[in-house]
């Protein structure tokens, strides 16, 4: 089964996008598994930024066989794509570092609800910056708010 | 106040990352994009650790290396890659509420693997997350 598909200019695909939802749930489960494993890691090494760097280095090396197999997939504009994805990686790492800096200064019960607002910020920024690419419907907004509320309760529990 | 600023900074950074992924996918497939995002992340983190956390490098043990290698596998090789693939198939608006449900699955794994217990807040939170996901998936 192919994992790659060209991105449509509007995020609407014909039929139910089952593969997309499978990938989304798989990502959530994988992130959750990493958090469970990371709890053990923090006991072993009390420097989460160092741990994150180690994780990134191993992941980059481990990803080489995956990207090697896909090198024949066409690239529309390497320079622009590289800039966007490099920026995505930098912001993602910045987010992790900011999160740890926040946790050093306040309790998780204060930090987690605030950092959990990221899906809401994503939807807000998508509505502003991705107007031509994405359709932010009321249902998506309500769904995002419910997920956020649920995340806060689970984190605080 | 500083902690709030850092936490808000984390949320906005992750949101910007997702937006940039969506923009990048117009020009490059998710696989290559994921790899390039990993490289840029490594470069930034190596600089940060080299400048501010060098004193902790002596604390790295073989066990820590193994554990964080596993974290890298789950978080970046599977988590980030599947996240980027989901955005390429669904768009960032539909993918984000689902990938954001990570705490729900973390709670499930904690109960199943670590013997942690559920409480009313977790159950209520789970219901809200599932309800939100259902609304996103069911939209026409």
Image (cartoon, helix red, strand yellow):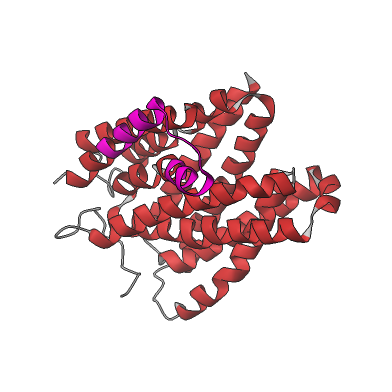
| Residue furthest top in the image | B1
Task: Write down the region rendered in magenta.
Answer: B106-131
User: Can residue A72 be seen at all in this image of the molecule?
Assistant: yes
Residue B127 lies within the magenta run: yes
Is B16 on the left or on the right of A147, as rendered? right
Residue shown at 46% from the left, 55% from the top = A30
Q: Give the quarter of the figure containing the N terminus of chain B.
A: top right
Q: Is residue A107 above or below residue A32?
A: above
The x and y percentages for residue B100 are 40, 42
The x and y percentages for residue B106 are 47, 44
Residue shown at 58% from the left, 70% from the top = A62
Q: Is residue A50 above or below residue A116?
A: below
User: Can residue B25 be seen at all in this image of the molecule?
Assistant: no
The x and y percentages for residue A58 are 64, 64
Residue shown at 73% from the left, 54% from the top = B46
The x and y percentages for residue B94 are 29, 46
Q: Magenta-highlighted stretch: main secondary structure?
A: helix
Identify which residue, B81 or A90, lies in the foreground. B81
Identify which residue, B104 or A73, lies in the foreground. B104
Residue shown at 45% from the left, 40% from the top = B107
Identify which residue, B76 or A154, lies in the foreground. A154
Is A61 on the left or on the right of B86, as rendered? right
Is A75 on the left or on the right of B93, as rendered? right
């Amino acid at each position: 089964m192919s994992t790659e598909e060209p991105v449509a200019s509007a995020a609407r695909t014909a039929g139910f996008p089952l593969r997309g939802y499978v990938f989304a749930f798989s990502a959530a489960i994988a992130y959750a598994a990493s958090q469970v494993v990371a709890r053990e890691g923090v006991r072993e090494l009390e420097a989460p930024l160092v741990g994150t760097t180690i994780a990134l280095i191993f992941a980059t090396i481990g990803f080489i066989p995956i990207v090697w197999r896909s090198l024949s997939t066409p690239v529309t504009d390497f320079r622009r794509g590289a800039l966007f994805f490099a920026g995505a990686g930098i912001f993602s790492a910045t987010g992790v570092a900011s999160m740890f800096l926040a946790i050093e200064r306040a309790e998780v019960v204060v930090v987690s609800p605030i950092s959990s607002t990221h899906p809401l910020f994503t939807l807000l920024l998508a509505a502003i910056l991705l107007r031509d690419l994405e359709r932010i419907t009321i249902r998506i907004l309500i769904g995002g708010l419910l997920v956020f509320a649920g995340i806060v309760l689970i984190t605080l529990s | 106040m500083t902690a709030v600023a850092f936490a808000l900074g984390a949320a906005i950074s992750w949101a910007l990352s997702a937006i940039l992924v969506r923009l990048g996918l117009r020009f490059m497939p998710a696989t290559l994009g994921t790899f390039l995002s990993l490289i840029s992340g490594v470069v930034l983190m190596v600089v940060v650790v080299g400048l501010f956390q060098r004193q902790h490098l002596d604390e790295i043990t073989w066990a820590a290396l193994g554990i964080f290698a596993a974290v890298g596998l789950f978080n970046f090789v599977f988590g980030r890659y599947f996240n980027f693939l989901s955005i390429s198939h669904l768009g960032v608006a539909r993918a984000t509420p689902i990938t954001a449900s990570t705490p729900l699955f973390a709670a499930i794994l904690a109960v199943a693997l670590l013997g942690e217990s559920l409480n009313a807040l977790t159950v209520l939170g789970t219901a809200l997350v599932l309800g939100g996901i259902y609304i996103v998936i069911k939209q026409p």
